[in-house]
Amino acid sequence: MENDRIRPDHQSVNLPAQDKLTLQRRTLLGSLFGAALGTTFGATLGTIATSAFPRFAFAQDALLPLNTPGLDHLDVIVPDVAATAKFYMGVFNTTLHAQPFQGGQRYFVLLGPLPENRAVGYLAIGDSRGRGTYIGHFCTSVVDWRRDSKAIFAAMAESFSDAGLGEFPGSTGVGGIFADPDGIEIQFLPAPDTVVTAAVPSDLVAAGQGLVTPLRVDNVLLQVSDLDRALAYYRILYGNETQRDDAGHTVFEFSNGSRLLLEQTTYIYGNAQPRIARFGIRVAPFDHAAVAAGITRLGATVLDAEAADVVRFRDPDGNVVELVPA
């Protein structure tokens, strides 16, 4: 993604709004410097800045594409949070945390040991409160998010408008959550992402009893209504996609090894609505047959997967999940 961020071409280009503002400031400063010296040298520097090296010279000032390590966490929205937490603690050999939330509990299945700074990936489990069952949002943490959040949202709004994607409404939920034009929810949080301090170890179920050891979020699959326009949207956020995988998904790869996958929805029952269709968790190597049998005993349905070493299943709530060996 870093290669997408810096483009040292020497041609005139149409710049995003945040780059235009940066260049205007550099030109002004160059002109003032020249006036102070009694020469045109400073103004000349400003002219060079605006025309000769438009992206390379000022890449450090660009807010988009985002400076993100990648996918950090996601959540599932279910009618019985305790039952879902118990299921995933049967899958993952890890610890469970809980946070009091709106009169109930919100659970956090940790995707690794909890360090002192609480920087660890996790699967959050929230109460649907009659909203059905679905994968709620995915999060990509952002470097310097606390400092730059307002400027990033402003740059996003300008870039989306320029791309013909309409008026960006900004954050529509708690903690920087917003939606893409399909209504798919995304969250930005400061990098590194951390488990909320209000979440404490839960005694709902014993720790360390699961089938596989989780390491991090591996992938999230989005089914979108218009692939070309969705790609234009996500390129603004994350830079250019890197490849198409064996299943035909368009793939955005991140520095932490996670992947965001996009595919067009198909006009069939159960698959026509834009959504987060599934997620994958990177886990330590495991015995495929033994884990598949264990998943079945826990009440899930094992599904076919493109990769022979991946275990894909539909959990008891109907969400589709993959276990991807490291």
Image (tube, rainbow, N blue to C red):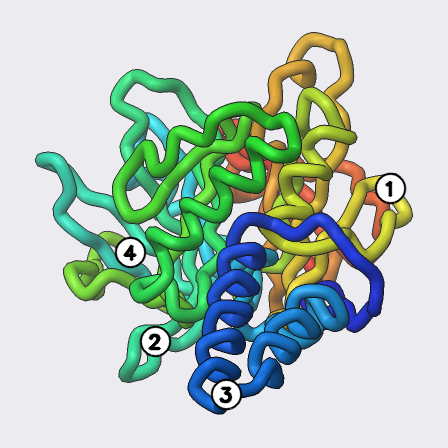
Q: Residue at x 86, y 49 (%)?
A: 245
Q: Residue at x 46, y 51 (%)?
A: 139
Q: Are marks 4 and 1 in contact (CB under 8 Å)?
A: no
> How far, Cα to Cα, is label 4 from label 1?
37 Å
> How far, Cα to Cα, is label 3 from label 2?
60 Å
Q: Which mark is residue 38?
A: 3
| SS at badge 2 | loop
Residue 41 left/right relative to 35: right
Image x and y of residue 86, in percent: 36, 47
Q: Which mark is residue 247?
A: 1
Figure quadrant of the C terminus: bottom right
Residue 272 left/right relative to 33: right
Q: Foreground mark, 1 or 3?
A: 3
Residue 305 left/right relative to 166: right
Q: Residue at x 9, y 35 (%)?
A: 103
Q: Foreground mark, 3 or 2?
A: 3
Residue bearing the label numbered 2? 114
Figure quadrant of the N terminus: bottom right
Q: Earlier in the sequence, mark 4 or mark 2?
A: 2
Q: Earlier in the sequence, mark 1 or mark 3?
A: 3
For residue 3, what is the image quadrant? Answer: bottom right
Q: Classify 10 Å Cα crowding around label 4: few (below 14), some (14-19), many (20 and above).
A: some
Residue type of the residue flagged with mark 4: Val
Q: Are marks 4 and 2 in contact (CB under 8 Å)?
A: no
Q: Residue at x 56, y 86 (%)?
A: 39
Residue type of the residue flagged with mark 2: Leu
